[in-house]
Image (cartoon, helix red, strand yellow):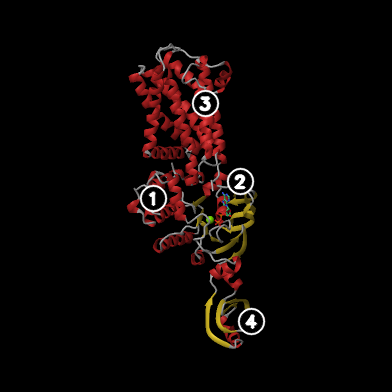
Amino acid sequence: MVIIQTKKITKKFGNITAVNELDLEIEEGEIFGLLGPNGAGKTTLISMLCTLLKPTAGSATVNSFDVFTQQLKVRKSIGIVFQEPSVDDLLSGRENLELHGMLYGMDAKEREKKIDEMLKLVDLVDRANDPVSTYSGGMRRRLEIARGLMHKPKILFLDEPTLGLDPASRKNIWDYIKSLAKEKSTTMVLTTHYMEEADMLCNRIGIISSGKIIALGTPAELKRKVGEDIVRIKGTTDLEKLKRYKFVKKVEVDGEYTELILDNAAENLQTLLAACSKLDSVEVRAVTLNDVFLHYTGKEIHDEEEGEGSWFERVMRVGGTRA
Amino acid sequence: MLELNAVYAIWLREIKVYLREKERVISSIVSPILWLFVFGSGIGETTYPGTSNYQAFILPGILVMSVLFVSVFYGLYIIWDRRLDFLKEVLVAPVSRASIFLGKVLGGVSDAMLQAVILLVIGTLLIIPLEPIRILYILLILTLISFSTASMGLVLGANMRSQEGFILIINFVMWPMFFFSGALFPISNLPEVIRPISTVDPLTYAVDALRTIFFGTGAFPFYIDIVVLLAFAAVTAILGVISFGNLQQAK
Ligand SMILES: Nc1ncnc2c1ncn2[C@@H]1O[C@H](COP(=O)(O)OP(=O)(O)O)[C@@H](O)[C@H]1O
Ligand SMILES: [Mg+2]
């Protein structure tokens, strides 16, 4: 069953088109990954699906409710971990979670239990009663995640949930996401900068660039579309000849290296190497999601290049502006 | 339409935040006391409707002023909530925007009333003794006023994009509303041309209602004051629910 559907959904900010007539269908129970360079429109798309931003044009349904006309019903179906910091500085960690539980209609007992479970998950038990203003950036992030995961929504949006986390916390979050996925009752929409994270967690991935989905499929399908293996050769090669082979999907020259994407290196590597007159070194590896990403967007994914500074800088800046 | 647990949750957050920001609490208590004693002592003895003590005469006006300032500032505060993005968490919650709005308003009413009670205690002890039943009526009227002014502040805050509007609102909304309300002088002393402005200023009726309770005489019949104040509350509340319904994330 399709649980999220967008039809030509569009969001413009002045003359910037953040999301551009985007069509997307997400199936119930899947973990859907949204990958794209910074500014591609991922957060804007999620904000519209969460009823926090009104689309400029087009429509979308979430859990079969219209995000425009049935906002409250949509909100009752979803949970979200925001990309931007949104925990309350003046409250303690526990109070933030308590407020969340109350807003989501949990009774005191259920709240208590869930809060303890979440604090343990994100390793904040010791600091739970300190004001958030005394937390480090990573701790705030973890609290943010705990809050988003606290109630079990039908659809969970995770906007770069593990950005800026240490490896141990990241692994905790992955395990929790996987355990949620096993129950099959939660659909997840995840954006991330970490390709291995997307590869490991997501059933399907959509690559988004300039507000459009430009590639869609399972991680394996996407990789296959690009090619199976990458061969990096240092030596003298005859480019024209190489390009003529059917199994060669792409050839790129990078200084004294030639990089080729091909199908089935095991079968075709000999033919390929025979066509090179002089070989200094050869390196073969499988295509990764990162190659897929590069192939479609022409860009490396970098978390540092956020226009307005990193997540942490933003926390600090915002923290300082309050009255 | 209204989820009481959500209203309570939001109100509770506001109270906690308010009590934790010590400077806010202290300044909100100190400034009206200064007003009362600076303004109240500057002017010589004349007779005012119902009293010959100028300090007593302006006490209702100072109460209204303090409620106005605390609750409007409180409302404008959501600009910071938005910049902080905390508001997003509340806006995406599965509760009606009317509940969010009501929880917020009640937070503002609580802040304003805390201060009003302190002022009233000082006023009763030092300026004009009042019996408990009159104090009760005064508190009820002040609650109604703070409900409206907090709603007004939230409407302004919800529709404002940046802090620049802040100064404009203080200069072109709050001060005029205060001055034309007759808080510091009887409106009968005002020049003819200004009197129509006083007549459309809802705070005129707030001050008048309080004066009627304090001194037994007012410029308008008491029921008119009450009807105007109820209408003011209804209009600001409706505008508030609409504004909150339209609230989107700031960025
Ligand atoms: N509130 C806003 N006002 C103006 N431009 C915005 C706003 N929010 C996002 N944008 C712009 O829309 C584009 C998409 O942003 P965003 O959805 O945050 O991208 P992503 O999450 O993929 O990094 C960017 O060019 C960004 O600058
Ligand atoms: Mg984003």
Above/below status of A39 relative to B74: below
Q: The residue under label 2 is which amino acid type?
A: Phe
Q: Write down the residue under mark 1.
A: A115
- Check if mark 4 and mark 3 are on a common chain: no
Marks 4,2: beta carbons within 8 A: no
Q: Tell me the mark number nearer the camera, choosing from 2 and 3.
A: 3
For label 1, count other residues whose C-alpha is less than 10 Å away and answer few (under 14), some (14-19) or many (20+): many
Which numbered disc flags the more N-terminal residue, 1 or 2? 2
Which numbered disc flags the more N-terminal residue, 4 or 1? 1
Q: Write down the residue under mark 4.
A: A239
Which numbered tag is attached to residue A68? 2
State the count of labels: 4
Element marked by disc 1: helix
Marks 2,3: beta carbons within 8 A: no
**Residue at image coords 46%, 30%:** B69
**Residue at image coords 54%, 46%:** B250
